[in-house]
Amino acid sequence: MKNKPFMYTDIFYPDSASWDVESAPDYHVPNILVKEDTLFQAYTIYCAAAIIPHDANLKIRFVGQNYYTPTEPYCQGWQYYAQSYAYTLYAQRWNELMSAEIYLWDPGSATIEYFENDMDTPAFTKIITWN
């Protein structure tokens, strides 16, 4: 009998992941989306990584400044939409890793809002700071 791939049933935020899933899958950096983590280091690369099940949707909104926003090729599996002092990531893959590079530069703070499964209000919100 052939092994079936693991099927995620909940949205999963890994502790770390590559911000370049296709070219450097084994190069891991901390995941800024881990809900418990709120304090980070300035001048450091992080990732915004998640895996969602087939029946889920995920939108992540960052509001703030002093961070580098993801661009191709370092935004894989997400659709990226930029606004003034904010940007939004929309999930484009199901049951596989999505990751985007996030570079925090000059010390600052931002709010991250997690919109899960087409909710109009965030399922979770956190404020992050970096020094």
Image (tube, helix red, strand yellow):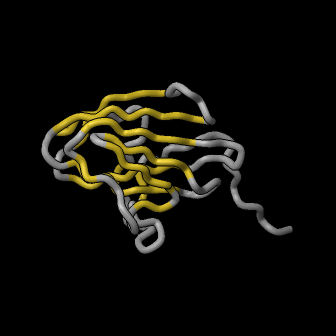
Residue 130: image location, x then y, percent: 20, 39
Report the residue that reaches farthest toward the right: 1
Count the labels in the image.
Answer: 0
Image quadrant containing the N terminus = bottom right
Q: Residue at x 23, y 34 (%)?
A: 109
Determine whether, in the image, residue 57 is placed left or right of residue 54: left
Image quadrant containing the C terminus = top left
- Vertical placement of 114 versus 8: above or below? above
Which picture quadrant has residue 19? bottom left
Determine whether, in the image, residue 18 is placed left or right of residue 131: right
Q: Residue at x 50, y 27 (%)?
A: 122
Which picture quadrant has residue 87? top left
Determine whether, in the image, residue 89 is placed left or right of residue 54: left
- Vertical placement of 43 versus 118: above or below? below
Residue 35: image location, x then y, percent: 43, 34
Q: Nearer the viewer, residue 9 or 119?
A: 119
Q: Residue at x 29, y 42 (%)?
A: 84
- Vertical placement of 69 versus 114: above or below? below
Report the residue that reaches farthest toward the front: 84
Q: Residue at x 57, y 35 (%)?
A: 116
Residue 101: image location, x then y, percent: 35, 57
